[in-house]
Image: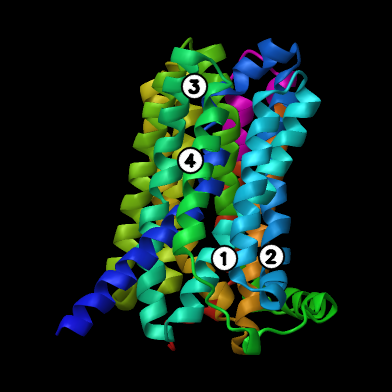
Amino acid sequence: MISNKKSEISSGYFLVVLVLISMGGPLGMNIILPSLSSYQVAFETDYALSQLTLTVYLAAIAVGQLIYGPLSDRFGRRPIVLGGLLILILGSLLCFFAGSIEVMILGRLVQAIGGCAGMVMGRAMVRDRYPPEKAASMIAYMTMAVVVAPSIAPMLGGILEDQAGWRASFIFVKIFAVLVLLVAIFGAQETLPVQKRHQARFGTLMMSFAYLLRNRTFLVYSLQVSFSTAAYFSFLGGTSYVLIDLMGGSATELGIYFALVSAFYILGNFITARLTHRVGIYRLIKAGTLIAIAGPVLMVITELTIGLTPLLFFGEMCLVATGNGLCIATGVAGAISADPERVGAASGLAGSMQIGFGALATFVVGLLLSAFETTALPLIFVVLFCCIAAAISARLGGSTDLSDPS
């Protein structure tokens, strides 16, 4: 009895450590969103360049997911975690002292490389320690906790922006990373024994990626997830300009509205967790993509008739968030189940495509909002395009449903 209790405490502490390790990347990504417009003023640049501080961050995470896994298989998980946190601290300091938009973008690149390590290693360390059934449960709990970071980060960033200026967000991320580094030094034990390590074979990994891209099931599910994610990241990338510059809102308001949208995304995921076994992956994906399309369609109608207000703008985006909650997790499950012999490679490639599409979408939104400065329609049309593309991808996967044998 005492032994079981100690085991539960140990597992709980291990989970808390992994949650903290995994939160750095999402926190650093979203905390700057209310400050994108401030970078324009501070560095005397346009919104497209200011937007690159988010786009470059996403691109670095997309690439990092493909690299950190093989590196950790060779050198172990703990060195990657500690090194990543040190890089995150360095990147945050570089951003804080940035005197130009170019240095800021470089600092964001360094930040992302550091933050990505914990995101990848958290899942790997769970799989190292627990058998598949227990690992799935632990990863589910970890994911629910990690979602808190991107949900509250914009609100926190907005408050810091209004009270202390845009540099305050980077000090917060640096302090957070230092504290997590101390926790990791004493609490993040190595989970991959030396005898189980092997040489990283990037050539073999690239061949696996090429094989997966020829797998129709993997491709359609991955594209659906990638376009759905791109719709959300498009919104993330352009909302600061729309709310603050076009609608006259504040950074704090932006953070609060983002928290509302995140709550609906969490709701969609909760519904997915409850209904997947009864409804099936493909039906949830179809429902999610259709619900998501309704959001930007209503935005276009509202903008062209009575005009968008912040409440209507974010309220209609909640439809996209709910739809994504139904179709992203299910789409990922479909993608990584497409080839049982390449689950790890499928997970890395699908995740990289997901973030990569999001990075491209934010870049496009930045360019369009810089070219058409007086309306939110460019942002809305990009979100609409991504939602429609996700729905089309889902329909292409109609005969590849993995949950319904019929």
| 20, 355: nearer the viewer | 20
- Left-right relation of 318 to 367: left
| Image disc number at residue 303 | 3
- In which quadrant of the rendered image does the N terminus lie? bottom left
Residue placed at 80% from the left, 79% from the top?
201
Marks 1 and 3, how far apart at CA: 43 Å
Residue placed at 72% from the left, 48% from the top?
59
Asked if the residue under mark 1 is in contact with the one under mark 2, i.e. CB atoms within 8 Å, the reply is yes
Marks 4 and 2, how far apart at CA: 22 Å
Position of residue 290 measured from the top left corner of the image (x, y, whole percent): 45, 53
Residue where numbered disc 2 is placed: 68
Q: Is residue 221 visible?
A: no
Foreground disc of the pair 3, 2: 2
Q: Which badge, 2 or 1, comes first in the chain's sequence?
A: 2
**Can you say whether 191 is above or below 22 in the image?**
below
| Image disc number at residue 405 | none
Q: Is residue 185 magenta?
A: no
Residue where numbered disc 4 is placed: 176
Residue where numbered disc 1 is placed: 121
Residue placed at 30% from the left, 60% from the top?
271
Magenta residues, start to end: 369-383
User: At numbered mark 2, what does the secondary structure look like: helix, strand or loop?
Assistant: helix
Marks 3 and 4, how far apart at CA: 40 Å
